[in-house]
Amino acid sequence: EAQVTQNPRYLITVTGKKLTVTCSQNMNHEYMSWYRQDPGLGLRQIYYSMNVEVTDKGDVPEGYKVSRKEKRNFPLILESPSPNQTSLYFCASSLYSGTYEQYFGPGTRLTVT
Amino acid sequence: RKEVEQDPGPFNVPEGATVAFNCTYSNSASQSFFWYRQDCRKEPKLLMSVYSSGNEDGRFTAQLNRASQYISLLIRDSKLSDSATYLCVVPERGSGTYKYIFGTGTRLKVLA
């Protein structure tokens, strides 16, 4: 089944404790992206990747890191999480960028206390 | 002006009604557009793509007005199951590739 998976689905952590949210897709898509969704602000793009080893900042990259060492995986790293990073996070992939449909993972609900 | 703007709603309509909502965008160079549906903080799912003047899929019709820079989504014969948030998405060309700009969504409630 074609899908985007994310783990964990729910995470409660404390300020400053490094964490990684994994994202994997099995559709051989070139483009992958991370979003955060906050009430009243909609989905905002954090980082995106056009291919292996090619990443770029979206609109809200501060406090996040990503890597794309393999085509299928695109982990999101929070080196020192803070309470303002409490949010609902979605990973997405598409064959290419632009006119192609994005497929979203189920989301990761992160709470930083 | 926001890059992609939607009326947040909620639009409360009775079953069987026709409802339409708009999405305005600021980048006149935008060429493609998407409507996604999102149920209660679940992942967004593609409803419709719009590349030229419009698109139709069953009860759903999307229309593009380039002169006024908006796209609309029309839902005919509303069903209870259409209750959701509808997100407008506009890809924006950056340096070498695209990033995606989402509207904040329009909430629809279809009432029995």
Image (cartoon, rainbow, N blue to C red):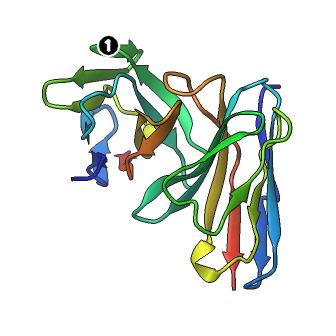
What's under tag 1, amino acid-wise?
Ser
Would residue B81 be seen by someone viewing this image from the given angle? no
Nearer-the-camera pick, B108 or A50: A50
Which residue shows up at 67% across the image and 63% down it? A64
Q: Badge 1 local density, few (<14 within 10 Å), some, or many (20+)?
A: few
Image x and y of residue B102, in percent: 43, 45
Which residue shows up at 68% across the image and 53% down it? A107
Image x and y of residue A51, in percent: 72, 31
Q: Relative to residue B86, is residue B76 depicted above or below?
A: above
The residue lying furthest to the right in this view is A70
Nearer-the-camera pick, A92 or A96: A96
Give the left or right position of residue A35, taking residue B86 as reference: right
Nearer-the-camera pick, A66 or A86: A66
Query: Where does label 1 land, which residue?
Result: B52
Would residue A44 be seen by someone viewing this image from the given angle? yes
Give the left or right position of residue A107, taking residue B18 as reference: right
